[in-house]
Amino acid sequence: MKRVVVTGLGTVNPLGNTIADFWNNAVAGKSSGALITKFDASRFRTKIACEVNGFSPEVYLDRNEIKRSDLFTQYALYGAAQAIEDSGLDFSTMDPFDTGVIWGVGQGGMETFEKEVEGYVLGEYNPRFSPFFVPKLIVNMASGLISMKYGLQGINYTTVSACATANTAIMDAFNYIRLGKAKVIVSGGSEAPITPASVGGFSAMKAMSTRHDDPGTASRPFDQDRDGFVMGEGAGALILEEYEHAKKRGAKIYAELVGAAMTADAYHMTSPHPEGVGASKAMLLALKEAQLPTEALDYLNLHATSTPVGDIAELKAVNSVFKGSKNLHVSATKSMTGHLLGAAGAIEAILSIKSINEGILLPTINIENLDPEIPEGIQIVVSDPIEKKVSTAMSNAFGFGGHNATVLFKQI
């Protein structure tokens, strides 16, 4: 089996539109939670989100790309462009069939769908839809347009596993490169869900916070007064590359991807297994694949969305796998970024990798009173970052439908 390394990173998200800004704001413990500005949310139960600010797609996209793509695809193209630039890859020197894209998207073109249907219902199209309606809407268009932009003719598709989506994409890319079916794959995920229908749907489920008096502290994993997640948006992109190929061209290597696993709870449409059985198995399988004992893990970026049930279920899973470990620290960075749904795993994988590079454990902000149900012995990084040598970092992502996906990175 081939070894797989990360040689490029890119992002656009509520904490920054570059990797440097993203990382610096995360270390500073900055919150991106605020009242929604993208549309009038006054009629909804939830009026809070973590929005991308100052996004200028024309930095990396031309006029036609912007015109013909939904925002989730624009985020994907933007993040991928950064990551490819960061990697120093020259695709013109490679066999195009050795390069591919495996990209994760949970919902797809919600904004496009809503606007087109609204126009139809109001009679504005009489009853003509835009010829770009379907291409802008479908979830696989992000991977398709990335491949077209750079001439990547190898493996190309989109994964969908709700909020586990980006980790699923990364795992698939990892496996294809290990099997020798590609040398380079652009992977990650994107999402643009801050729209009336999406916010309205999650709001109706009572899954999101209603802390409108102080939206900056609304995302509060592990706090006993947490009342739901805060929706985010954006993209995270990783260049996964076969190790010998990267080494030969003298590439900068951020980390090695050494383990990845998926399991299913087979329990409930929207709730995790209360004891975290599927989550614990995913972590154990990733460790086994990496040939690492539990005590060797330094840092775990938790899925922890700030829901009353989900946070405790995940910590029960962590406790069952790592109980007794004095080395492991955990944190929940959604407290700062909000929950990017299908893109969450991608930006959290990036933060996990950067923790290895920088020797910093990121904080969980907004915790005022730790939930007394948290199992004893779990070392949660609260409020302020901690300096620590990080050789191994794991990132969890779980989704509606009972999907669990875990990725594990190691210093090289």
Image: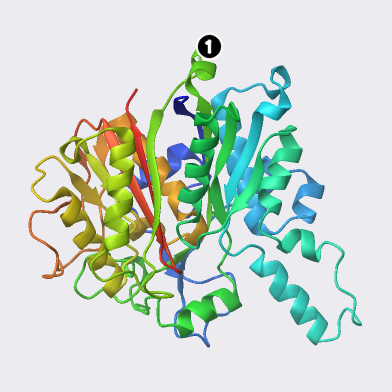
Q: With respect to residue 104, does 314 lie above or below? A: below
The foreground one among 407 and 332 is 407
Amino acid on which disc 1 is placed: Lys
Relative to 92, is 382 on the left or the right?
left
In which quadrant will I find the C terminus? Answer: top left
Relative to 246, is 292 on the left or the right?
left
Taking the image as drawn, is residue 28 in sight?
A: no
Taking the image as drawn, is residue 337 in sight?
A: yes
In percent of width and height, residue 284 lies at 27, 47
Dot 1: within a 10 Å radius of its alpha carbon, few (fewer than 14), some, or many (20 or more) residues? few
Q: Residue at x 35, y 41 (%)?
A: 352
What residue sits right under mark 1 in the picture? 248
Q: Secondary structure at mark 1?
A: helix
Q: Residue at x 63, y 40 (%)?
A: 101
Q: How many marks?
A: 1
In percent of width and height, residue 10 lies at 53, 39
